[in-house]
Image (cartoon, grey):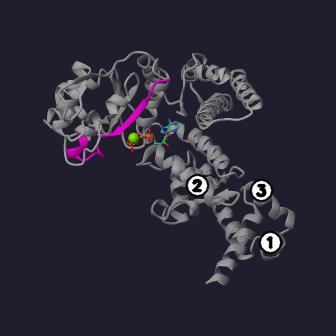
Amino acid sequence: MKILDDIEDLPASPATSYAALLEKIEILRSTLRWSSRMERPEIEKLLRQASVLRDDVMQLSHRERFVQAAVAEPQRLPGSARERREALLARSFIFEGTFGDNPKLLEALEIAEKAAPTDLPVLVDGESGTGKELMAKVIHANGSRADRPYISVNCGAIPDNLLESELFGHRKGAFTGASNDRKGKFESAHTGTIFLDEIGELPLAGQVKLLRVLEAHEIQRVGSDEPIAVDTRIVAATNRNLRRMSEEGRFREDLFYRLSVIHLTLPPLRERRDEIALLLAYFGDEAAATLKRQPVKMTLRLREFLRTYDYPGNIRELRNLVYRIVCLAPETADIEHLPVDIRPGNSASMVSGMVASAVSLSDAKRTASDEAERAFLERGLHEVGGTVAELARRFEMNRSHVQMLLKKHGLHSKDFRNHAASAAQKEKGS
Ligand SMILES: Nc1ncnc2c1ncn2[C@@H]1O[C@H](COP(=O)(O)OP(=O)(O)OP(=O)(O)O)[C@@H](O)[C@H]1O
Ligand SMILES: [Mg+2]
C-alpha cells in the first residue's frame, strides 16, 4: 500500500509545526478511508505512525508551554537569559520537555546543541534528579541520529557476570543458560545512540571492555572471536565525581577522558532557585492536565516553603511534590498536602521563618499579621465545615467582610465543605 510507505518516510522533523502534523493526520485518515481490509502488519504500521504523531504533538506542546512561560514572565528574566532561550527556540532546538532559564542550564543546553550533531562522546554529571537522562535524550533528539535507535543501559543495575553479555551479546552455548544467539545493547544501538547511565558503577573489568569498544568501534559477542563493527554514539551519565574516582584508582583514567570529550555538569536545583517558580507553574499545569482537574492554587506559606526548600532529590523531587499536591489538594493546597517527613514542624516556625526573611520591620509585621489572620480563618472554616454564614456569626462579623477576607487569602469555603464531608465519611466507615 503506497500511502502507508509515504507516511513512514516522513521524518519526525525537529521543526514540527501544526501544518506538518495536520498533513500527517490527513495521510493517516485517507489510508484508513480507502482501506477495505487491513492485515496485522499494516495495522502495526499505522500504530507506529500514530505513536510518531503523538510524540510530535507532545513536542509541540512542550515547546508552546515554554514560549508561553517566556512571554508570561518576561520581566523576571535577565535580558541575556531570555534572548538565549529565544535563540534556542528560533533555531528549532528540541528541548524534550527540558524547562528552565537559569544561566547554568542554558549553558548546558547550548553545549548540548553544539555537541548533538557531532559523534563526540558526552559525559553528563550532576546530583540525582537534575535531568541527566533528559539531557541525554536532548542530545540524541537534536543530532543526526534522531530517527535511529536510542538505547539506554543502566550500568549499575546489571550483575557483574551478565554485564559483558548484556552490552555485547553472546553466542548460543557461550555459558550455561545461553540457549540462543543474542544481540547486546551496543549492536541494538548500531547507527544510533547508547546511553550508559550510572557509568560510575561499572566494574573495572567492564571499564576495560568498554574502552576497547571506544577505541576500535567493534565488539565481540561472548563466546565468539568474530569482531562486529558498531557505529554508536555514546552518552554517559553519573552522579559520582568520575575525575576524583579516577584519581583514587576506582575508575580508569583513560576511559574517563575518552567518555568526557564533552563534559556537561547539571547544577542542583538549590543552585538555580530562580527557576523554582517557573517549574512549579509548569509541573502544576502538567499535573492538572494529567490528572484531569483544574489547576491548584497554593497558599502563600506553601509557596514560601517550596521556594526555600533544599530539594535533595532536585527536579524529580519537585515534580513529584507538585503531582502529589495536585492529586491530594482541593482547590487550594497548603502545607498539610506535603509529605509528613518534609512538612515544617508547625506553622508558628513557618511564620517566624517568613518574618525572618522580611526586608523591613513593617514588612515583618504585615507578614506575621497576615499569617495569623489566615490561620484563624482556616481554623474557623474547618470548625464550621465551610459555612460562611456560620463563620460570620462566630466571628461576630459582617458576612461580606468575611467573604472579602477569604478572597484576600485565596481560601474557598467549599474546600472545607469537602473536607468536612470526607471526614464525616471516614468516621462513618471506621
Ligand atoms: N530542566 C528540566 N525541565 C523539566 N523537567 C525536568 C528537568 N530536569 C529534570 N526533569 C524531570 O525530572 C525527572 C528526573 O530527571 P532525570 O531522570 O533526567 O534525572 P537524572 O539526573 O537522570 O536522575 P538520577 O541520577 O536519579 O538518575 C524527570 O521526570 C525529568 O523529566
Ligand atoms: Mg538518571
- Relative to 58, say whether 376 is above or below: below
The residue where tag 2 is placed is: 302
Side (left or right) of 51 relative to 402: left
Tally the marks: 3
Residue 424, position as x, y percentages in the image: 69, 79
**What is the three-letter code of the residue carrying label 2?**
Leu
- Please state if 354 lies on the left or on the right of 200 as rendered: right
Residue that numbered label 3 is attached to: 407
Q: Is residue 297 visible?
A: yes
Q: Quadrant of the C terminus?
A: bottom right
Quick check: is 160 in the magenta stretch?
yes
Q: Earlier in the sequence, mark 1 or mark 2?
A: 2
Q: Which mark is residue 167?
A: none
Ligand 2 shows up in the quarter that is: top left
What residue would you read off at disc 1?
387
Snapshot quadrant of residue 107: top left
> Which segment did they paint magenta?
147-163
Q: 141 or 160, which lies in front?
A: 160
Residue kind at label 1, given as amino acid type: Thr
In the depicted view, which residue is nearer to us: 323 or 351?
323
Per the image, label 1 sits on a secondary structure element best described as: loop
Horizontally, residue 67 falls left or right of residue 316, namely right
Furthest-left residue in this view? 249
Say which element carries label 2: helix
- Other-residue count near label 3 (Cα within 10 Å), few / some / many at <14 / 14–19 / ≥20: few
Vertical relation: 164 (above or below) 304: above
In the image, taking residue 424 as reference, residue 255 lies left or right, namely left
Q: Quick check: marks 1 and 3 in contact, CB under 8 Å?
A: no
Amino acid type at image mark 3: Lys
Q: Residue at x 28, y 35 (%)?
A: 167
Residue 100 x/y as whole percent:
54, 33
